[in-house]
Amino acid sequence: MSPASTGASTTVGAVPTAPVAASPSSSDSLMAPGGPGYRRMSFALFLAGVATFALLYSTQALLPLISGEFGVAASDASWTVAAATGGLALFVLPMSTLSERYGRRAVMTGSLAVAVGVGVLVPFAPSLGSLVVLRGLQGAALAGLPASATAYLAEEVRPRALVTAIGLFVAGNSVGGMSGRVITGWVAQEWGWRVAVGVIGAVAVACAIAFRLLLPAPRHFTPGSLRPRVLARTVRDHLADPLLCRLYAIGALFMTVFGGVYTVIGYRLTEAPFSLPQGIVGSIFLVYLVGTVSASTAGRLVGRLGRRGALYLAGGTTATGLLVSLADSLPLVLLGLVLITAGFFAGHAVASSAVSRTATTGRAQASALYQSAYYIGASAGSTVGATAFHAGGWAATVGVGVLAVLGVVTITVFGTRAARRRPLVAAH
């Protein structure tokens, strides 16, 4: 793994500069736990994570109701989730490029503003098609958040605290995903899915305002140009890095599992033998709190087991949860969801922070490529998981998830062997 820069990333269109770590005064100005601004920064990005996942997955717990209103199957309704994640995947790289030129904070603020604006229109969608289009626009707007946030952290936080800081942002994702689904579940049970997504939009507005007021101004960002040739070279260099490509694939596969499970779980729990009401189904997503803990402790996990050891543990935990969830017992299904969620968020935090540490130049683009792969996995998981459920029930969805976890383990094993071969090659 390439050594992580401790200062500002090299910007697009600029000549690579020496790491800021070479200057003690610059290194001292990087934020660290307990230092000035760190708590405000952490809370601001935590709120950004809450808003991002609450908006991105605002329809996921409501899919059975959306299917009922528009008279469509699960695989059709799942496009309201897949369109949002797909829009984010397509636009995350262009938005990260804008953040290299205009700044991380400006792009994150603008993205949240547009996303909450589109959110005002979502409850009034007259058809499934228009709802899918609006959700796609909302996902595209949110694309400015994930990559810009991780690039901001890589530039402003000391390297030893980076995994923890990114873990807190990912923890905000889990809280947003959990609260959005719980709120929509209970609100929809009383007033319908349209009011439910409207309430989530209002919560996101509050998070966006607080985020802008709290986030410290960047101190280590240097703007770059928007020259397409330079961007293309930066992206090509990242895609030529074997470690980065492995991390991108791991993020996509983890999210395939997660997207498939949580897109379909509402259908499974509203059908026999469980037949739970919508409010209770929404409350199932309180399991996301487990993800908040596992993501925020990912730094300590890497410290004890190393990056690859942490990924093995995350993959094994996720696979165990998938198999446990096959039981027709609600407590065992819940236990399975706990394990799936813990494994997923830990794996995601480890992989995403490794990308930020590996890329010493063009960090925003490196993070954007990870996020693009990650949300492509989300879209694939939503559609393939729902299609599998329609064809073969929950067992088929679990089968898709197990195959994805096997992919994670295989890639990690390959990376472990490659790391062991490098010292032998260097010795010769």
Image (cartoon, helix red, strand yellow):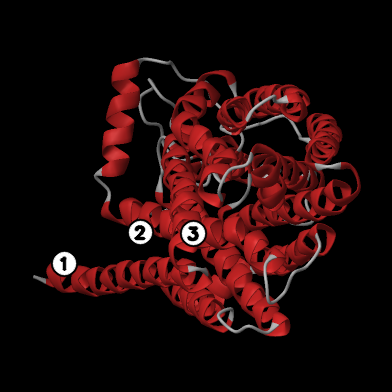
Residue position for label 1: 426
Q: How many discs mark residues in the rendered view?
A: 3
In this rendering, the answer to whether 124 lies above or below 339 is above
Residue 420 % position (x, y): 24, 75
Determine crowd level at label 3: few under 14, some 14-19, many 20+ residues with C-alpha closer than 10 A: some
The residue labelled by disc 2 is 1
Q: Of the residues shown, which amino acid type is indicated by label 1? A: Ala
In the displayed image of the protein, which residue is found farthest to the right?
190
Comes first in the chain, label 3 or label 2: 2
| Circle 3 or circle 1, nearest the eye | 3
Let me know if residue 9 appears in the view: no
Residue 390 circle label: 3
Q: Residues within 10 Å of mark 2 (few under 14, many from 20)?
A: few
Q: Residue at x 63, y 66 (%)?
A: 268
Label 2 is placed on what type of residue?
A: Met
Furthest residue to the front?
71
Task: Where is residue 256? Give x, y as percent.
Answer: 46, 57
Marks 3/1: CA distance?
Answer: 52 Å
Upstream in sequence: badge 2 or badge 1:
2
Q: Nearer the viewer, mark 2 or mark 1?
A: 2
Q: Secondary structure at mark 3?
A: helix
Quadrant including the N terminus: bottom left
Ranked by sequence position, the earlier of labels 3 and 1 is 3
How far is the residue under mark 3 from the one under mark 2? 42 Å
Report, in whole angstroms, how far the alpha carbon at label 2 lies from the one at label 1.
15 Å
Residue 279 appears in view: yes
Q: Nearer the viewer, residue 309 or 191?
A: 191
Establish if 105 lies above or below 21: above
Question: Would you identify the image quadrant in which residue 249 lies?
Answer: bottom left
